Amino acid sequence: MNTSSRMEQLDVLRYELEVMRQEHRDLDDAIHALQERGGADMLTMKRLKKQKLALKDKIVQLEDRITPDIIA
């Protein structure tokens, strides 16, 4: 893979990462709004929290692909 292609691939990964981070923040805001409202449906809360956790796992995987561990 040439350097230009690798850079384009990294740009795509960075964009995907930013989109996922925004989705994670949106889920966090939705969870907080339901908690503040009180009497929130516990099943809905559980689903949102599960989605948020799965999204966080995907974010970590993407971050690892973009910035791999390099032992100096």
Image (cartoon, rainbow, N blue to C red):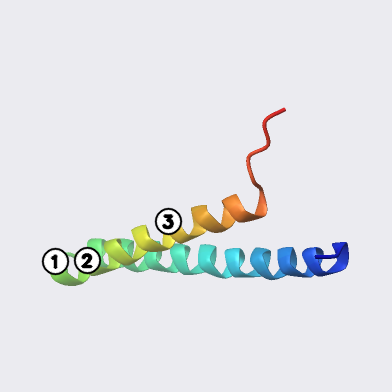
Residue type (three-letter) at the residue carrying disc 1: Met
Please give left or right for residue 33 compared with residue 69 in the image: left
Q: Along the line of sight, which residue is nearer the eye, 3 or 21?
A: 3
Label 3, label 1: how far apart the Cα atoms are: 23 Å
Q: Is residue 3 visible?
A: yes
Residue type (three-letter) at the residue carrying disc 3: Asp
For mark 1, does the 10 Å Cα neighbourhood hold few (<14), some (14 to 19), or many (20 or more) residues? few
- The dot on residue 66 is none
Q: In the rendered view, tell whether residue 60 sits above or below residue 45.
A: above
Of callouts 2 and 3, the N-terminal one: 2
Please give left or right for residue 30 compared with residue 39 in the image: right
Please, what secondary structure does the residue beneath circle 2 have? helix
The residue indicated by pointer 3 is 57
Q: Position of residue 62 (x, y in %)?
A: 56, 58
Q: Along the line of sight, which residue is nearer the eye, 51 or 65?
A: 65
Q: Is residue 41 visible?
A: no
Screen quadrant of the N terminus: bottom right
Residue farthest to the top, as pictured:
72
Instruction: Look at the numbered discs 2 and 1 and tell me whether their residues touch, using CB distance below 8 Å.
Output: yes
For residue 13, which quarter of the picture?
A: bottom right
Residue at 42 percent across and 63 percent down: it is 55
Residue at 52 percent across and 67 percent down: it is 20
Q: In the rendered view, tell whether residue 64 sits above or below residue 36.
A: above
The residue indicated by pointer 2 is 45
The residue indicated by pointer 1 is 42
Please, what secondary structure does the residue beneath circle 1 have? helix
Residue at 50 percent across and 58 percent down: it is 59
Label 2, label 1: how far apart the Cα atoms are: 5 Å
Q: Nearer the viewer, mark 3 or mark 1?
A: 3
